[in-house]
Each structure stands twice: as C-alpha cells, then as structure tokens.
Image (spheres, rainbow, N blue to C red):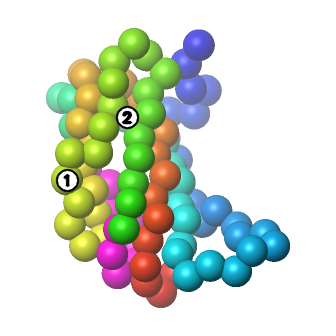
Amino acid sequence: MAFDVLSKNPTLVENVGINHSLIILSGVVALSGGTKTVTLPGVDFVVYANASSQTANAARISATDKNSFTITGTGTDVVMWTAHCIGKQ
C-alpha cells in the first residue's frame, strides 16, 4: 500500500482540548535523489520531526536547522512527516 497523496504543503494540526505551546505541522513530500529539505514558513524552530515511508525503505530526519529539516530515504519515495515547532504560526 502506498500513500494516495504525493505532495502536501505544511498543514497545521489543530489542537483540540489540550493547551500546549508547540505548533504541530504535517505534510507529504516526494524525495529527489533520496533527500528532501522541508522548510516550514511561520515557525522559529523545529523541536522534533519524524518521517515515514510506506515502502520497505526507511525514511529518517537527517538534519534540522531553525525552521527546516532534511529527510533522507531512498530514490523518489513519497514520505509523510510531522514536526513539532516553536514559533508564530
């Protein structure tokens, strides 16, 4: 089974019922040459990010830098990601 969505811009995950200070965003990207850098507009820092692929190939976060992170995987795999951030949004 593969993701039906091949691309999705960063989308705010609505906080329902619990008040917290982190902004949670999610999205979907296709890797290019095994990597993809995701930049999140409107946030100051990425505190935590994770990625998953629905192929047998692993996808992982290989670096973060302020409001962006790099996903490393295989080829052109489609990867879903979530990120917990501090900032404006």
Across and down, in percent, residue 4 comes to: 61, 26
Mark 1 vs mark 2, foreground winner is 1
Residue 7, numbered circle: none
- Going from N to C along the chain, the mark reached first, 1 or 2, is 2
Across and down, in percent, residue 12 comes to: 60, 66
The local secondary structure at tag 1 comes to strand
Across and down, in percent, residue 65 comes to: 20, 66
Residue type indicated by callout 2: Ala
As measured in the structure, the alpha-carbon distance from the residue carrying label 1 to the one carrying label 2 is 17 Å
Residue type indicated by callout 1: Ala
Q: Which residues are magenta?
A: 37-46
Picture quadrant where residue 47 is located: bottom left
Image point (43%, 16%), residue name = 55
Image point (53%, 73%), residue name = 23
Picture quadrant where residue 49 is located: bottom left
Disc 1: which residue: 63
The local secondary structure at tag 2 comes to strand
Q: Where 22 falls versus 73 (above or below)? A: below
Asked if residue 49 is among those painted magenta in the image, a careful observer would answer no
In the image, is 24 to the left or to the right of 29? Answer: right
Disc 2: which residue: 30
